[in-house]
Image (cartoon, grey):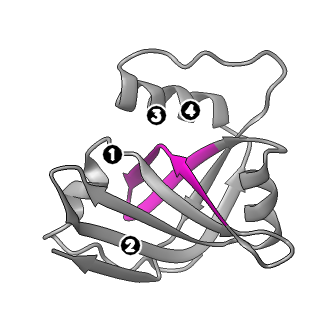
Amino acid sequence: MTTPTPIPPSHIDLLERPIVAALATALPDGTPQVTAVWFNLADGQIHINSAAGRLKDRAIRASPYVALMVLDPQDPYRYIQVRGPVVLITEEGGDAHINALSHRYTGKDYALVPGQVRVRYVLSPEHVDVHG
């Protein structure tokens, strides 16, 4: 597992607040794909969640290097961009993680879809750029 690049104190609030982020992945044909995602920061790493088999899941599994950008809702010229490898892809705890994210963003339980498999991905920050 890689050692995460520290998040600058000036912008850590953007990762600690429940702000929807933009996650960029590369599709198998090399074209980019961007998705709005819920996330949380834990131990210097960024955790996201998706359903197994979705485009985002397939893209991350095929090319596990991603970029995440979080804009400050009060100042769109203040943002943080984090790029790095996805160092863990696991179904273990996926349901609990999406439920925790739902509480973080909506204050209520996540409506799990019967039969759907939730996957947790852990992004280890390798490059961190901040602006504003």
Residue ID for mark 3: 101
Query: Which percent across, then down, holds residue 16?
Result: 27, 50
Residue under the point 26% across and 45% down: 17
Q: Quadrant of residue 110?
A: top right
Q: CA–CA distance between discs 3 and 4? A: 5 Å
Front tag of 4 and 2 = 2
**Magenta span main SS:** strand
Residue ID for mark 2: 81
Proximity of marks 3 and 4: CB atoms separated by less than 8 Å:
yes
Q: Residue type at mark 2: give it.
A: Gln
Q: Residue type at mark 3: give it.
A: Leu
Magenta stretch in the rendered image: 33-49
Q: Secondary structure at mark 4?
A: helix
Q: Secondary structure at mark 1?
A: loop
Front tag of 1 and 4 = 1
Labels 4 and 2: the sequence-earlier one: 2
Residue ID for mark 1: 19
Labels 2 and 3: the sequence-earlier one: 2
How would you rate the neighbour count of disc 2 (Cα within 10 Å): few for under 14, some for 14-19, many for 20 or more?
A: some
Q: Identify the mark at residue 98; answer none if there is no mark.
A: 4
Q: Residue type at mark 1: give it.
A: Ile
Q: CA–CA distance between discs 1 and 4? A: 15 Å
111 w.r.t. 80: above or below: above
Front position in the image: 61 or 28: 28
